[in-house]
Image: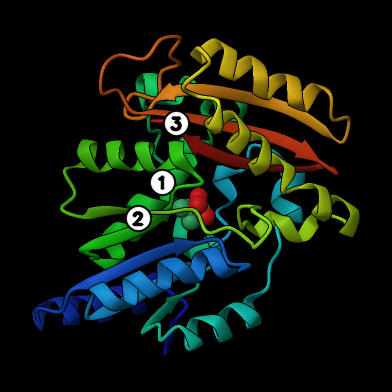
Amino acid sequence: MKICRTVQELTSITEQLKQENKTIGLVPTMGALHEGHKSLFVRARKENDIFISSVFVNPIQFNNKEDFEKYPRTEEQDIKILEECACDIAFIPTAEDVYGGQTPETFTFGQLEQVMEGVQRPGHFSGVANIVSRLFIWSKADKAYFGEKDYQQIAIIKDMVRQKSFKIEIVPCPIFRDEDGLATSSRNVRLSAEARKIAPKIHQILLESYRQKDFLSISQIKAFVEDEFKHNKNFVLEYFTIVDDKTLQPVSQREENQGIVGCIAVWLDGVRLIDIQRYW
Ligand code: PAF
């Protein structure tokens, strides 16, 4: 595996690869790699001649300084995992190299960012779009792989691709869960042992609401989930929003054939966890 630490190094290699007509798959990450990332790596490896992964904790997508500082950084371990997953190129740049001297672009996403993460984390998606758009250009990837836990992020990235007329396929990948149902996340390592035991409750509550979906209205599903968290004092629910799966606008009633997803952000032990549940 080749480790590229500068944009220049990466772009000269990808230039050459494109001249050789190689297909390139990209998995952008912020490191602290876990089983969820590995499931994306397996797909990227299988579906492309060349598999590139980036490891970069993108400062401009954090609207909370403490969250940025506390974000786990495990570069040595990440490199080992990437090697085990048969990655061809690990791109591990510095912030100076990615943004040095340039003012980040301001992206806007209309209604897509006026809900959920977009409301709770102002500027977050513009920060994500800045790094992801750069990674797409530098990697010259044909396909890029993202986990569906960050459901709104995928919709935003698809819109960014449309705005920029990039020729790249966005591949959403199913959430990878630990055996007890907790969605894998780099933030899980920050949970105390006690909190880690409680955390699967998030998925359990969402699953229970899914089982009742044919007997409850959408607002009753929402009330059920909110109530469950209200009665469990370990959690502080930030939002649970039931949305159209494409527009991400909250729905109160389901139209025929409409895809519906519930998105949740909840605090446990000072750690912010997100998850989703598809209803239809
Ligand atoms: O989902 C993430 O880990 C990040 O938002 C991403 C896509 C790597 C951009 O920094």
Observer able to see residue 12: no
Answer yes or no: disc 2 within 8 Å of ligand 1: no
In primary-sequence order, the first of circles 3 and 2 is 2
Q: CA distance from mark 2 to mark 1?
A: 6 Å
Q: Is residue 45 left or right of residue 273?
A: left
Residue ID for mark 1: 130
Element marked by disc 1: helix
Q: Which mark is residue 134?
A: 2
* x and y, in percent, of residue 241 in the image: 55, 22
Q: CA distance from mark 3 to mark 2?
A: 34 Å
Residue ID for mark 3: 279
Q: CA distance from mark 1 to mark 3?
A: 32 Å
Observer able to see residue 97: yes
Disc 3 residue crowd, few under 14, some 14–19, many 20+, Cα 10 Å: many
Which residue is more in the foreground, 145 or 127?
A: 145
Given the image, on which type of amino acid does mark 1 rest? Asn
Q: Are marks 2 and 1 in contact (CB under 8 Å)?
A: yes
Query: Which of the image's four quarters has the C terminus?
Result: top left
Given the image, on which type of amino acid does mark 2 rest? Arg
In primary-sequence order, the first of circles 1 and 3 is 1
Element marked by disc 2: helix
- Residue drawn at x 84%, y 24% is 231
Which residue is more in the foreground, 235 or 106?
A: 235
Above/below status of 230 relative to 98: above
